[in-house]
Every structure is written in C-alpha cells, then in structure tokens.
Amino acid sequence: MALPVAAAPAPENGSGVDSARRNKIIASVVGGVVAVLAAVYLVDLLMTSGTIERNTSVAGVAVGGLTPEQAAAALTEQALPEYSAPVVVDVHGVATQIDPTQAGLSTDVAATVQALGTRSANPFVRLSSFFTSIEQPLTDGVDETALTAVVQGIATSTDLAPVEGSVAIDNGQVTTVQPVIGRSLDVAGSVESISAAWISGGPGGLGGLVLPVSAAPVRASVEGTERAAAQAATIVSAPLTLTGGGATVEVGAVELGAATTITPDSADGFVVAVDPAAVLDAVRPAVEATQSAPVDAKVVIRDGAPVVEPSAAGRALDAAATEAAVAAAVTTPNRTVELAYQLSDPAFSTEQANALGIKEVIGEFTTGGFAAASGENIRVVAEKVNGALVMPGATFGLNEFTGPRGTEQGYVPAAIIQEGALSTAVGGGISQFATTTYNAAYFAGMGDVTHTPHSFYISRYPAGREATVFDGEIELAFSNDYDTGVLIETIWTPSDITVRLWGTKHVQVESVSSDRFNYTSAPVIVKPYGTACTPSGGSTGFSIVNTRIIKDLAGNEIRREDFTTVYNGQQNVICSPAPAAASTAPATMDAAAAPAAEVPAGG
C-alpha cells in the first residue's frame, strides 16, 4: 500500500525536482523489499507449517524441519539404541558400566517430540531460527529405587576396607603387608549425580562421570612400608661376623631378627632399629671367651737357661664401642665387626722381667736319701716352689709361699721329729726341702731372715747348716738384698732334690765350720707297755759354729756371719715289754715293742 508523500517546497534554484525524484526511487525500493520479505515469509509459513523448528537436535539427531512423526521415527532409529547401551562411569578410578534400563534411566521419544512442538508463526522467531540452534536430550526420568539398587551393587563390588601396612621379621624372614587406602562409594551422592547427568545430557552427560567416593586413609604409605622392608631385609641378609682375640663369632639371621624392632614412626613409615646389646647377648659366651686377663711376664728355665716369657695386656670387651659398631654394620652390606676392647696392663711386664737380671746360677744345693713318703711330699712342695720369683728387696718365706700343706694339697703322712723323737705327720719330709733351699740361698748370698735347725742332728745334712719348718709355726725365710731378682728352680728325682737360685752374681760365699764341741749324751725315754712306741737307739748331742764368709766378686771380704747350732742328743726310746704274768700262752713279741728299722728323718 502506497503511503502519502508531502510536497516539498520548490527550491529556489530549481533543484527541488531532483530531490522529489530521489524520494520516489527510495520509496519504491523499500516497498519492493518489504513485498519480497512478505512473500518469502508467506512461502516459508506455507511450506514448514506443522514441522519442528529448524536447527533443532535431540540426542545428536537433527529433527529441525521434520514433522513430529518424522522426528519420532528418526529418534527411534538413531538415538534410542545409544540410550539403551551401557554407559561407563568412573568409580574409584575404575571404569564401571551401568545398564540404563537396569538402572531405571528411562527415555520417551513421543514425550520428547511433543515437548519440542512445531514452528511458531511469529516472523521474528522464524527469522532468529536461522541464527540459533536447539539441543535436547532424549530423556524422560529416573527410577531412583532401581538406580539406588544398582549403585549399591557397584559399592559392594568396588568398596575396599582399609589395610594398615606392616613389616615384621619372623624367624629371620621379612614379612610385609602392603597398605591399602580404604574406599567407599557415596551411594546417595552417586544416585543424585547420575540422575542429574542423565536428565541433562543422557548417555553423553553420563559417560565418564566421576562418582563421588570417600576414602579411609591409612597411616603407612606404600613407599614407607617398602623402605622399612628393605632396611629389615638388609639386617637379616647375611650373618654378622664378629672378630676379636683371634676368634670369629657369627650371629645368624634368626638372632639378628630377634634383636630388631620395627615400629611406626611419626610420619608414614617405620623405625627399624637393632638393639646391639641383644645381638651381643645372643652370642655372649663366645664373645666373652675372646676376652683375656692380663698375663704377667714369667721367667722360666728352658733348655738349662733362663728365658723371659713375655707379658700380654688384658682385653675386656668395650661394650659401648662394640655395640655402636654392630648397630652400624647390620644396616650395611659390610657384615664384619671388629670387637672393641679396653686393654689393661699386666702387673709384671716383659720389660720388668728383663730388668731383673736373671741370667746365671748364683746358688745351688742338693740333698738325697729320703724315704718314699717323704720324697712324695718333697716332690709336691718342689713343684709349688719351682719358678718362684724373689724381687729385689723382697723376702721369700717357705710357709708363706706354699700355704697349708695338708691332704687337700696332695701331701701324705711321713716321718717328722716331734718333741725330740721320730713321729709321723702329713707333710713330713718338707724339712729336707727347707734344708736344701736354705743352703742354696746361703751360697747365693741371700740374707738370713729366719731359719731353725733340727732339734737333733741328721747325718745327711751339713752340721750347723740346715733348717726345719713346721706348718704355721716354724718358718724358713731369706731376703734378696740386691737390686736384681732371683728365680728359684727345683729339680726333683726319686732319690734327691736340688734347689737352684738364678740371678746376677754379686758375691762369692765360703762356708767354714768349727769342730764339734759340748757333747751331750742321749736322753733315755722308757715308754710303758701299751702306749705307742717306736724304739730308737739315740745319738749324742753337740754344738757347732758355722761361719759364712761373703766376698765381692774380686775376692775382697765384705763380712762374716757366725751361726751357732746346739744339737740335742736323739732320744734313746725303750719300749717296755709286756708283763710276764699277762698270758700263759707261748710268748710273742708285741708289734709296738718290736725293734723298728731306722726311719730316715724327713722333718
């Protein structure tokens, strides 16, 4: 329809005619465009009436421009199979399938198409459809009861109970339990997520959906557990070898494992600790056997000459240092530990022994003629004294050195002199050893501390130069008054005893004895019949003076020592016979009254 156009005033200069012409042209063009648009609209309206809006898709299927019937057919053919296929969701990081039908995830093609409707007659809506698109899912609803049942089934098959990691050593073998973090599917949250995804996007919205889960953490990590297992395996990987004192001691894997504790640390691992004291306790007797007390040097006679056997330091286990070394070694491939010791010095060192100057014989004496029983006691005491050292300035006492001389020490009954007469006692005969020792010390120039001659003279000893001893009462003692030591050597045979003193010779010794004088007769003792009695013929007593002359090695006299000895006569013991009226039977000799063979005095 033509619109009225107002007449413009005529231009003064004649241009009004051109302006009017332009306006007519514009009006004609606009009118033509409008007419065209109107025609297009009418044609589009006629041709697409009753169809779905262009650029509309449902579940990825283009249904724009289709009639509802056509759209329903297309969706049934193209989209419905996808909506019925299993969908994969993420459960605890594991791809898990869900069957939409079983899970109550429904579709409704007819309802979906109906909800789309047909195209609007509004020209502006139709115009905008050229520039917009519509995407709809093919969904209807969710059966939450069915979906909940499916999700609970997934939870049952995928949930894990937490497992705490642990490491232990059993009988030398490492056992490990790997930690597992517990996981639990959030059933309610999963149902809500699946429902929302299905309704909003169908399989496309549901595919790859990560379902909500809750975790039950454990303290230990896999790394911490494996680290502790590796440490424990190193500890029991091989025996631990302990060396020391020339010995080798092995601690096996079982003992090492028993000495190891594995406890949780403050983080996500374990503290693997070895108790080194327990390791050593497992082999304590063998380790302690490597210890040794300090050994003093000894001077011994070997092949007829003095030899110094060297001293040795004592070794006592240094527990702290050894335990530290054990603790370090058990966690490394180095399986050997050198035992640590604290050393202790001997009381008498090799240097001290060498400084004694024991190099030559300085005094020697031999006696013999003893009875068998006395000889046995002399052998026992000689073995005890052999090797005794007399340090410079020291005194040697026979009783003090040997201690008690009873049957417990190996001594036997033998002859002694008791109250001026022969008798018998355990240890008899030791006086012969004392006399031999006294003479060896005499000629070595030792100091005479104390010596006691026998009460009557015994012919096998030098008159005035002999000595007796008695346990705890009569001592023989001499002093070493020189700055060098003295070693006593004893040499026993069944027929004689030799005592030899070794050292450094400082003096020469001569012995001079006077004639015997002041003789006395033998006392007569008559013992009644029935008492113990050993008959003896007796001997004469006398006095004698022995002089020891001590000279230096150049022969210059240093001093003289006089020893006066007074010997009593040996008792003449008479055993009384039995009374004549005691028996009418033929006379027999009483054993106690029979003449006895002379017994060599041993005491």
Image (spheres, rainbow, N blue to C red):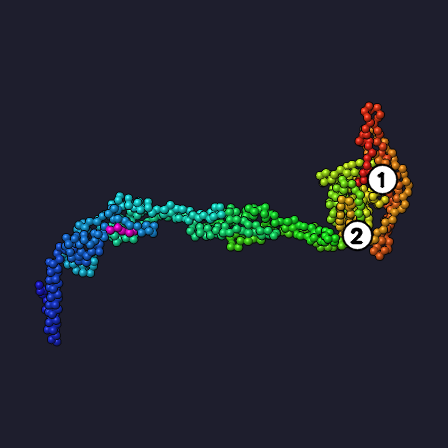
Where in the figure is residue 163, as x and y percent of width and height?
40, 46
On the question of residue 149 being in view, the answer is yes
- In-image side of 17 versus 516 (left or right): left
- In-image side of 170 versus 291 (left or right): left
Q: Residue furthest left?
A: 1
Where in the figure is residue 218, as x and y percent of width and height?
41, 48
- What amino acid is at disc 1? Phe
Task: Decide whether residue 48 is among the magenta residues.
Answer: no
Residue at image point 18% right, 60% down: 130
Residue at image point 73% right, 55% down: 354
Residue nearer the viewer, 541 or 63 = 541
Where in the figure is residue 426, as x and y percent of width and height?
75, 38
Residue 568 position by quadrant? top right
- In-image side of 289 versus 156 (left or right): right
- What amino acid is at disc 2? Ile
- N-terminal-most mark, 1 or 2: 2
Residue nearer the viewer, 597 or 185 = 597
Residue nearer the viewer, 573 or 340 = 573
Residue at image point 76% right, 54% down: 359
Element marked by disc 2:
strand
Magenta region, main secondary structure: strand
Residue at the disc numbered 1: 456
Q: CA distance from mark 1 to mark 2?
A: 30 Å
Q: Which mark is residue 563?
A: none
Residue 603 position by quadrant? top right
Residue at the disc numbered 2: 362
Residue nearer the viewer, 370 or 347 = 370
Q: Residue furthest front?
A: 586
Where in the figure is residue 457, as x and y percent of width and height?
85, 41
Image quarter of the N terminus: bottom left
Highlighted magenta segment, given as a residue range? 85-89
Element marked by disc 1:
loop
